[in-house]
Image (cartoon, helix red, strand yellow):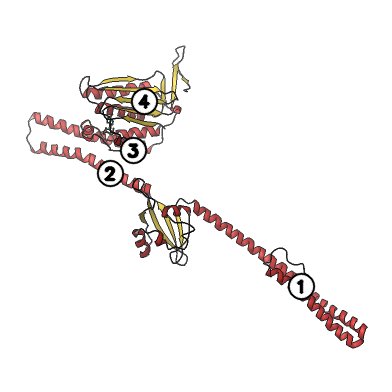
Amino acid sequence: MPVRLLAFVLWQAAGAALGGWLAGERGALAGALAGAMAWFLADLARGWRVLNWLRGGAEGEPPAVAGPWGESADRIRRALRLRERASAEAAERLQAFLSAIQASPNGVVLLDAQGRIEWCNQTAAGQLGIDPERDLLQHVGNLVRDPVFADYNAAGDYVRDVVITARDSSPGRPVRLSLQLHPYGEGRKLLLARDVTAIEQADAMRRDFVANVSHEVRTPLTVLAGFIETLQQLPLGEADRVRYLALMAQQARRMQSLVSDLLTLSRLEGSPSPGVSEWVAAGALLAQCEQDTRSLSSVLGKDSHELAFEAPAGLEVAGAAPELLSAMSNLASNAVRYTPVGGRIEVRWRLLPDGRAEFSVRDTGPGIPPEHLPRLTERFYRVDRSRSRETGGTGLGLAIVKHVVQRHGGELRIDSRPGEGSTFAILLPPARVRIVTPERDGASAPRATATP
Ligand code: ADP
């Protein structure tokens, strides 16, 4: 400021000196006035340049003017740059935040105080059929028309969610959505949409399973209770008593196998998959399976089935031997139980050209109609209900086989046609298969040969 005053005085003094030199005392006065005017005009020109720069949006460098105008322009420029940087950072943060919400597996819709859509992520757009651009500021009730949601939205109690059927749901592929509103800010709401199809299906499966188990247990239990009552109340002859006790034992065995299969299933579900370090000879597994199968077949009568067993020498598979044996025995026992007397059953292990090992059970039984094949491994799914019960089936055998196969990274193949018998095959991946050849010198240690 003092510099500015000094400049003003100097301009006046210079004008006065020039005026005085040219026209005496009056000239000095006029000169001083002219000096003051010239200083004022020069100052106005500087202010004008700064104002023009501001009117142009303060783009680029400010005009190079001296004095307070120049300093003001410079300070304005710095303040503007700081604000621009802050708003760019805020926009970047907002973008990162929106990208994170975009990546969410759940649908997110932001609603204004009137319930109109302000923003939604792609997941919500797909789930609720919203076009993120066209439907902006549309009322959410116009787009999510399910009456369950309309009532929920109107009631204003958002403590719980509501479940609706999604727009793209079809009978073959049902999709169920959980919707919940979360109020925030001044009357705004966040609508969260979650695909709960799998959870609902798991719930339904659990309910079915509990109902099935209860039903399976109740039937033999009712029979047993009936016999016990009869034995308690009626004076039975020895023959009747023996017959009743035999029937009771049969029902008890039925419950035992059911509980044992249920325990096997729960063990399979609750334990880690078997590693690839435990090797077991396919021949040894087959020998055990043959023993079980022959004794089951003999129960049905002497020479009831023509049975054939075969395994290549040296074939070894990696996994849990008890589980593999249980899967093999289940397939072989099904063949025996469903193939009428006189039929032929072939049980064998073989090495496939691609390095996998196949365990197959082929029978000349009744075969299975194609519509049942996709559901055979479901728990308690039976094609021939009465035959299954008569022969002590629990309806869990193939479910156990499927679990064992999956835990060993394998595949279960079912090939069957009515009237043409069935072939059930377990395929194990090459990583679980090897051929060992005995040492030439007769030493007991086997030698592993890489499979193709
Ligand atoms: P189950 O204990 O009833 O035998 P599974 O799960 O082992 O239960 O088999 C499911 C159903 O598949 C059986 O009830 C039967 O109807 C059918 N099934 C299984 N194996 C055979 C087979 N080898 N031949 C014909 N039907 C079979």
Report the side of 92 relative to 417 (left or right): right
Task: Specify which label sits upstream in the sequence, 3 or 2.
Answer: 2
Label 2: element kind:
helix
Give how far apart the Cα atoms at labels 4 and 3 are: 24 Å
Badge 2: few (under 14), some or many (20 or more) residues near its Cα, within 10 Å?
few
- Give above or below for 241 relative to 189: above
The residue where tag 1 is placed is 46
The residue where tag 2 is placed is 210
Give how far apart the Cα atoms at labels 1 and 4 are: 97 Å
x and y percent of residue 410 in the render?
A: 40, 31
The residue where tag 4 is placed is 359
Label 3: element kind:
helix
- Give above or below for 379 relative to 324: below
Task: Specify which label sits upstream in the sequence, 4 or 3.
Answer: 3
Task: Specify which label sits upstream in the sequence, 3 or 1.
Answer: 1
Question: 218 or 164: which is nearer to us?
Answer: 164
Name the quadrant containing residue 246: top left
User: Closer to the observer: label 3 or label 1?
Assistant: 1
Label 1: element kind:
helix
Residue sitting at x 22%, y 19%: 303
Question: 252 or 93: which is nearer to us?
Answer: 93
User: Closer to the observer: label 2 or label 4?
Assistant: 4
Q: Are marks 2 and 4 in contact (CB under 8 Å)?
A: no
Give how far apart the Cα atoms at labels 3 and 1 are: 89 Å
Task: Specify which label sits upstream in the sequence, 2 or 4.
Answer: 2
x and y percent of residue 21 in the render?
A: 93, 83
